[in-house]
Amino acid sequence: MTRNDYDTAARWIEEAARPVAFTGAGISVESGIPTFRGPTGLWSRYDPKILDLGYFYEHPKESWEAIREIFYDYMGANARPNAAHRFLAELERRGKLQGVITQNIDNLHQEAGSRNVIEFHGTAQKLLCTQCGDRTPFTEHDLNDLPPLCKKCGGLLKPDFIFFGESIPPEAYQRSLALCERADLLLIIGTTGEVMPASMLPYEGKKAKVIEINVEPSAYTAHRTDIFLRAKATEAAKELAKRLGMDLE
Ligand SMILES: [Zn+2]
């Protein structure tokens, strides 16, 4: 494993035939999206039980009040894609990225222009009816009146991301596996590999070399990573972009 070797990392990206990115909360921190874990994370202020399915069904109004604060007032309003999101979108545009597998539900990869985005944990952009399965953009619902109910059947709506104990959407899981298995280069950005089963994906891409961008060493650093770029996502993206002749502004 080599450290902070931006020249080699940039060359690997240029030479790769099927590079894939795997991102987590760390890529969106600089867009102002708070993380869940850690001493200043959201779970230090909110009780995680609001994302427990059983609790949610029993206390939909109370759960939704916290969900609205965390995911809709707070996250959505001011967050914009940053240089790291734009870097990945530009790589894809140049044919240098097959897709982004993200654990984030913030839609920032899509807003940056990435097209093949696999949302491993679902998305906050849509609401899912727990009765009839209908999915609608959250903007079609009045979140001042909680909990939001399905306009077709009156059923309780939940955000279309997975709650604790729910399984990964099968299509997202299959597409992620397929991408990883074929990948010859994996860019791990802003994820420390603590959340199962997403954390296993880099091990599925056995043939892929791994470039990891994180502010601290992670579960991958010693065992899976070939080049560890210890930096904020935007700093590393700018260093790589410079070497690849890209303008991220
Ligand atoms: Zn419904």
Image (cartoon, rainbow, N blue to C red):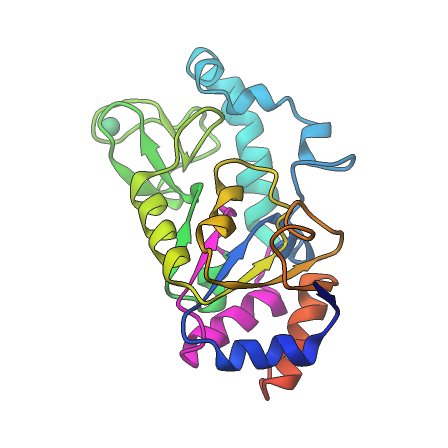
Looking at the image, is 168 positioned above or below residue 113? above
Rendered-image quadrant of the N terminus: bottom right
Q: Position of residue 71 (x, y in %)?
A: 55, 39
Q: Position of residue 170 (x, y in %)?
A: 31, 39
Q: Residue at x 51, y 56 (%)?
A: 22
Q: Is residue 81 magenta?
A: yes
- Looking at this rendering, what residue extends furthest in the bottom direction? 245
Residue 14 appears in the rendering: yes
With 244 as the anchor, is 101 left or right in this view? left
Q: Nearer the viewer, residue 129 or 39?
A: 39
Q: Position of residue 124 (x, y in %)?
A: 45, 42
In the picture, residue 113 is in which quadrant?
bottom left
Q: Is residue 211 magenta?
A: no
Looking at the image, is 58 positioned above or below residue 32? above
Magenta span of residues: 79-107
- Looking at this rendering, what residue extends furthest in the top direction? 58
Q: Position of residue 207 (x, y in %)?
A: 46, 61
With 220 as the anchor, is 132 left or right in this view? left
Q: Residue at x 24, y 35 (%)?
A: 134
With 183 as the anchor, is 243 left or right in this view? right
Rendered-image quadrant of the C terminus: bottom right
Q: Nearer the viewer, residue 98 or 86?
A: 98
Residue 249 appears in the rendering: no
Q: Residue at x 38, y 56 (%)?
A: 181
Image quarter where ligand 1 lies: top left
Q: Nearer the viewer, residue 207 or 152?
A: 207
